[in-house]
């Protein structure tokens, strides 16, 4: 599979609700592997299919940056069944490079998803892993971290992005 390009803020695909995956075929398996490589190459800990221009409900996560193979997860059609608590924290996003924002997330959650073998699973997450899961699900729902901040702060960040674009740094 070709090298994947990460879509940036302003790309329409990042604003769409991604479509459910109905068939886990070889294309999906290869796409998940290409997404894993693209995530590691960009020094990310999560990547959703809309971020590489594919509006489907697929995400990859690895908070170990590839150090622990057991940490790598593929999530197909994920959804949160339950969540509790609030945990503030700073987040960056591969689609909004160079920007880190304070975002409140649920501290604990129960996730239901399908793996690459087509098996449904339910897992509990907390802390950083819960945060990353919620961040990637936001992408699948057409939401960016910029959508989770006040309009005043969003205007400031958009001005900064325009400045970076004008200087060729975006």
Image (spheres, grey):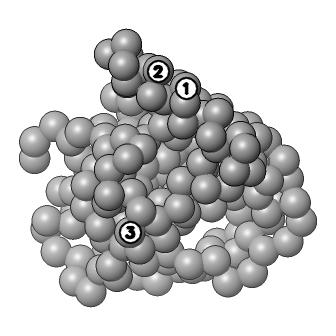
Q: In the image, is 137 to the left or to the right of 51?
A: right
Task: Give the left or right position of residue 160, taking residue 131 as reference.
Answer: left
Provide the secondary structure element on which disc 3 rests. Answer: loop
Judge whether 135 appears above or below 167 on screen.
Answer: below
Label 2 and label 1: CA atoms lie apart by: 5 Å
Furthest residue in direction top, as rendered: 167
> In whole angstroms, how far apart are the C-alphas of marks 2 and 3?
26 Å
Coordinates of residue 146 in the picture (x, y in percent): 60, 48
* Marking on residue 136: none
Q: Nearer the viewer, residue 161 or 27?
A: 161
Q: Residue at x 38, y 69 (%)?
A: 16
Which residue has dot 2 on it? Answer: 163
**Residue 169 found in image quarter:** top left
Density class for disc 2 (Cα within 10 Å; few <14, some 14-19, many ≥20) is few
Residue 158's image quarter? top right
Name the residue at 53% across, 61% down.
143
Do labels 2 and 3 touch, CB within 8 Å? no
In the rendered image of this protein, does residue 165 appear above or below residue 8? above
Q: Mark 3 — residue?
A: 16
Give the residue at mark 1: 160
At mark 2, the secondary structure is: helix
Please give left or right for residue 85 compared with residue 80 in the image.
right
The answer to whether mark 2 and mark 1 are in CB contact below 8 A is: yes
State the image coordinates of residue 129 (x, y, percent, origin top left): 66, 52
The crowding category of the residue bearing disc 3, from other C-alpha atoms within 10 Å (few below 14, some 14 to 19, many at least 20), is some
């Amino acid at each position: 599979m070709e090298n994947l390009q990460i879509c940036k803020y302003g790309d329409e695909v990042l604003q769409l609700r991604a479509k459910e995956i109905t068939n886990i075929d070889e294309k999906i398996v290869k796409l998940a592997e290409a997404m894993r490589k693209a995530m590691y190459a960009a020094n990310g800990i999560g990547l959703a299919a809309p971020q590489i221009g594919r509006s489907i409900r697929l995400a990859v996560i690895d908070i170990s940056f590839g150090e622990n193979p057991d940490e790598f997860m593929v999530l197909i059609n994920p959804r949160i069944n339950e969540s509790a608590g609030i945990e503030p924290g700073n987040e960056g996003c591969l689609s909004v490079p160079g920007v880190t924002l304070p975002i409140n997330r649920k501290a604990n959650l129960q996730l239901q998803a399908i793996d690459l073998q087509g098996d449904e699973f339910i897992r509990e997450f907390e802390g950083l892993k819960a945060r990353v899961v919620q961040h990637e699900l936001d992408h699948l729902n057409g939401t960016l971290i910029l959508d989770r901040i006040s309009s005043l702060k969003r205007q400031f960040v958009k001005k900064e992005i325009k400045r970076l674009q004008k200087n060729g740094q975006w």
